[in-house]
Amino acid sequence: HWLKIEFSQVKREGSWARYLTRDWNFIDSTFILLSLTSFVLDAIITAKLIDEDESLYETVIVVIKTLYALSYWFLGTKVFYYMRGFVSTSSSINMIISVVADMKNFSLVMLIALLMCGFSFFMLTDVAIDTGDG
């Protein structure tokens, strides 16, 4: 149902580029893409197309959990957008959206600084890999 609605909106906009320029459309399409990808990978695991003994199995499980976490985050974002329509929550939600928009540049600088420090400390540590041999 959602795919049909999204594709009709893309058709109305004329192109994917114009469609994705609106925040709401980006959130909708990302949520659908993440959910479908998670579902397909989960179906592969459930159908036992990957042996549980393979290291790929554990990697796919981690990817599935990550995709589900991201899709729930986008779902929460959609709920925030819906809450703007209620009188009792609209002012709070609009304030949160304004604060997040104002912090965009600061957040980017902070992310770069965190990654820079994280990579530096990672290179300084002596990482021991546990192989389970004893």
Image (tube, rainbow, N blue to C red):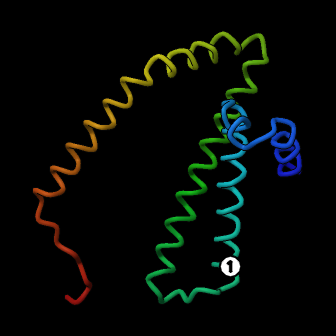
Residue 124, image x and y in percent? 10, 56
Q: Is residue 56 above or below residue 114?
A: below
Q: Nearer the viewer, residue 9 or 73?
A: 9
Quarter of the rendering containing residue 22: top right
Mark 1, secondary structure of its residue: helix
Number of marks in the image?
A: 1
Residue drawn at 88 percent across, 50 percent down: 4
The quarter of the image holding the C terminus is bottom left
Residue 132, image x and y in percent? 26, 85
Residue 56, image x and y in percent? 48, 80
Residue drawn at 21 percent across, 75 percent down: 129
Q: Nearer the viewer, residue 6 or 87?
A: 6
Quarter of the rendering containing residue 104: top left
Residue drawn at 53 percent across, 86 percent down: 52
User: Left of 113 or right of it: where is 40?
Assistant: right
Q: Name the kind of residue labelled 1 in the image.
A: Thr
Quarter of the rendering containing residue 116: top left
Is disc 1 surrounded by few (<14), some (14 to 19) or many (20+) residues within 10 Å?
A: few
Residue 70, image x and y in percent? 57, 49
Q: Is residue 22 above or below residue 45?
A: above
User: Left of 125 or right of it: where is 79?
Assistant: right
Question: Which residue, given by chain and number where applicable, does mark 1 sit on?
Answer: 46
Residue drawn at 64 percent across, 34 percent down: 77
